Amino acid sequence: GKPPYDDNNIFAKILRGDIPCRKVYEDEFALAFHDINPQAPHHILVIPKGRYVAFADFAATAPEAEITGFIRAIGHVAHMLGFEDTGYRLLANMGPDSHQEVPHLHVHLFAGRPLGPMLV
Ligand code: 5GP
């Protein structure tokens, strides 16, 4: 079933401004900021502003404007930072088998070096 949303998760706190982040981009629907433990020269997290834990819930229940806004924000960050020529990788973990650590939907954007083959 739908996982419950925890308003005390770390990204909820970032969205509220309770803890700081290194902001890359923000609009009505999404926030992008640098990952605190970067795995590539550029490692950015893009999150929707709404309270969603996982993709299935987001895709099934979010208003279309939020879905469009989130996807556009990811593309905008890639474009804005000039990753379209050299390339980049998007990755999103969902649930226990994926080792999702933060229960607020997020997409990782990796860029800035050859990333190698996708591991899984
Ligand atoms: P997950 O494993 O849930 O897909 O990824 C969570 C990501 O959030 C990890 O890459 C981790 O480094 C990052 N992260 C965890 N806590 C914080 C924080 O307080 N600030 C920022 N900017 N990133 C965080």
Image (tube, rainbow, N blue to C red):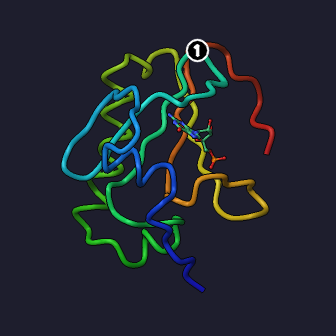
Q: Residue at x 22, y 63 (%)?
A: 65
Viewer-closest of 95 and 86: 95
Viewer-closest of 47 and 56: 47
Viewer-closest of 104 and 88: 104
Circle 1 crowding by C-alpha within 10 Å: few under 14, some 14–19, many from 20 = few
Q: Residue at x 51, y 66 (%)?
A: 53
- In the displayed structure, would residue 99 be above or below residue 33? below
Kind of residue at disc 1: Pro
Task: Please indicate whether residue 81 sits to the left or right of residue 100 in the image.
Answer: left
Taking the view exactly as shown, the residue that stands out farthest to the front is 18
Taking the view exactly as shown, the residue that stands out farthest to the left is 28
Q: Residue at x 67, y 25 (%)?
A: 39
Q: Quadrant of the N terminus?
A: bottom right
Asked whether mark 1 lies closer than 8 Å to ligand 1, one says no
Q: Which residue is mark 1?
A: 41
Task: Please indicate whether residue 45 sits to the left or right of residue 118 in the image.
Answer: left
Measured as percent of width and height from the top left, residue 85 is found at 45, 16
Measured as percent of width and height from the top left, residue 52 is found at 44, 66
Q: Quadrant of residue 98?
A: bottom right
Task: Please indicate whether residue 32 sits to the left or right of residue 91 in the image.
Answer: left
Q: Residue at x 33, y 62 (%)?
A: 50
Measured as percent of width and height from the top left, residue 19 is found at 41, 39
Q: Quadrant of residue 51?
A: bottom left
Dot 1 falls on a residue whose secondary structure is loop
Q: How many marks can you see?
A: 1
Ligand 1 falls in quadrant: top right
- In the displayed structure, would residue 115 be above or below residue 46? above
- In the displayed structure, would residue 86 be above or below residue 7? above
